[in-house]
Image: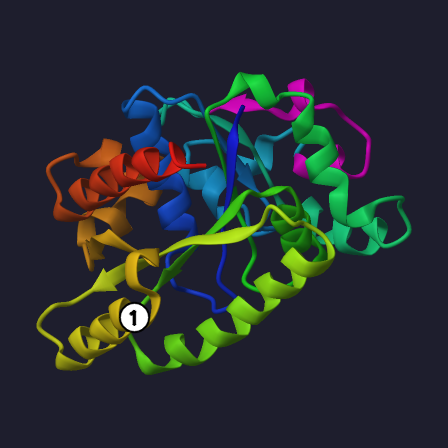
């Protein structure tokens, strides 16, 4: 049975896509069969996995609206060692079309159920808003991974996200829970970041992952080469942090 996790945060620019791509590649390197679902119309996770979103014949848009099945959409990442359900700008139109479809918030869930035995982990890269696309991700996930920077505004947005997850749990997906908070783009030289990190640990306890991803240039360079950072430069501190995070995820998944 696949463990399905959403990587979500309503705040943009917090490293959701970087986390998805690198976690998928790190899990694949650890021997886990992994599927990355790109639910963001920007298609950054698709491009970061080495797949040209402009050359796609079919994407996750076609899957959600019933124009293609999973086998027709699924693509192997040439550099990451995992499978991808890719996205491009077509997905922006799915928001409008899904409104009139049956079980609009469960379209992704119904599709993935048939392929449950194919994977150990399914990671869903959500757009930075609580849209119908994000709702599809949350409705089929067992848990949510929240990447966040240790800054004041990030704390403000976190309470909104937690409330949104509680509402989805109460009304649409009783299996949904917060798996953990991942501190990303961390700079230990900044006192504020250390203070916010300590606040998170004090409030959320073991929900905060032990792994901390530092601010790292090599992680930022990797997408321009069409590969995850853990493949682009395995020795980089950011890559090593994501490898540690992957092993932590494998351990936590055993308790599900």
Tell me the residue that label 1 is attached to.
200
On screen, residue 94 versus residue 205, left or right, reads: right
Give the image location of residue 72, x and y in percent. 68, 20
Q: Residue 122: within the magenta?
A: no
In this rendering, the answer to whether 158 lies above or below 136 is below
Q: Callout 1: few (<14), some (14-19), or many (20+) C-alpha neighbours within 10 Å? A: some
Quarter of the image where the N terminus is located: top right
Task: Label 1, secondary structure: give it.
Answer: helix
Side of 224 relative to 111 (left or right): left
Q: Is residue 87 above or below residue 74?
A: below
Evaluate whether residue 89 shows in this view.
no
- What colour scheme has been applied to the protein in the rendered image? rainbow
Q: Residue at x 76, y 49 (%)?
A: 105
Q: Position of residue 224 (x, y in %)?
A: 33, 43
Question: Which residue lies at the image location 66% right of the left edge and 47% below the top edge?
Answer: 139
Q: Position of residue 61 (x, y in %)?
A: 71, 40
Residue 227 or 38: which is nearer the viewer?
38
Quadrant assignment for the C terminus: top left
Of all residues, the one furthest to the front in this rendering is: 255
Please say whether residue 115 is visible from this viewpoint.
yes
Q: Is residue 196 left or right of residue 15?
A: left
In this rendering, the count of numbered labels is 1
* Residues rendered magenta in the picture: 60-76
Query: Is 63 included in the stretch rendered in magenta?
Result: yes
The x, y position of residue 20, in whole percent, is 41, 44
């Amino acid at each position: 049975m696949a463990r399905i996790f959403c990587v979500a945060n309503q705040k943009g620019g917090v490293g959701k896509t970087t986390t998805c791509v690198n976690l998928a590649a790190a899990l694949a390197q650890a021997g886990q069969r992994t599927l990355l679902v790109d639910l963001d119309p920007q298609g950054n996770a698709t491009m970061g996995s080495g797949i040209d979103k402009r050359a796609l014949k079919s994407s996750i848009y076609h899957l959600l609206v019933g124009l293609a099945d999973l086998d027709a959409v699924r693509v192997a990442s040439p550099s990451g060692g995992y499978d991808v359900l890719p996205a491009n700008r077509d997905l922006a139109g799915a928001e409008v079309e899904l409104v009139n479809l049956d079980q609009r918030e469960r379209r992704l869930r119904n599709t993935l159920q048939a392929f449950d035995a194919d994977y150990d982990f399914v990671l869903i890269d959500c757009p930075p808003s609580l849209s119908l696309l994000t709702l599809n991700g949350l409705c089929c996930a067992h848990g949510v991974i929240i990447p966040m920077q240790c800054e004041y505004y990030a704390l403000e947005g976190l309470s909104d996200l937690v409330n949104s997850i509680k509402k989805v749990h109460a009304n649409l997906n009783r299996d949904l829970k917060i798996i953990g908070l991942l501190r990303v783009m961390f700079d230990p030289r900044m006192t504020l970041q250390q203070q916010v990190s300590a606040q998170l640990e004090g409030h959320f306890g073991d929900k905060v992952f032990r792994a901390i991803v530092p601010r790292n240039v090599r992680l930022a360079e990797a997408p321009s080469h069409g590969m995850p950072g853990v493949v682009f430069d395995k020795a980089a501190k950011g890559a090593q942090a994501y490898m540690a995070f992957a092993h932590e995820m494998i351990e936590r998944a055993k308790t599900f």
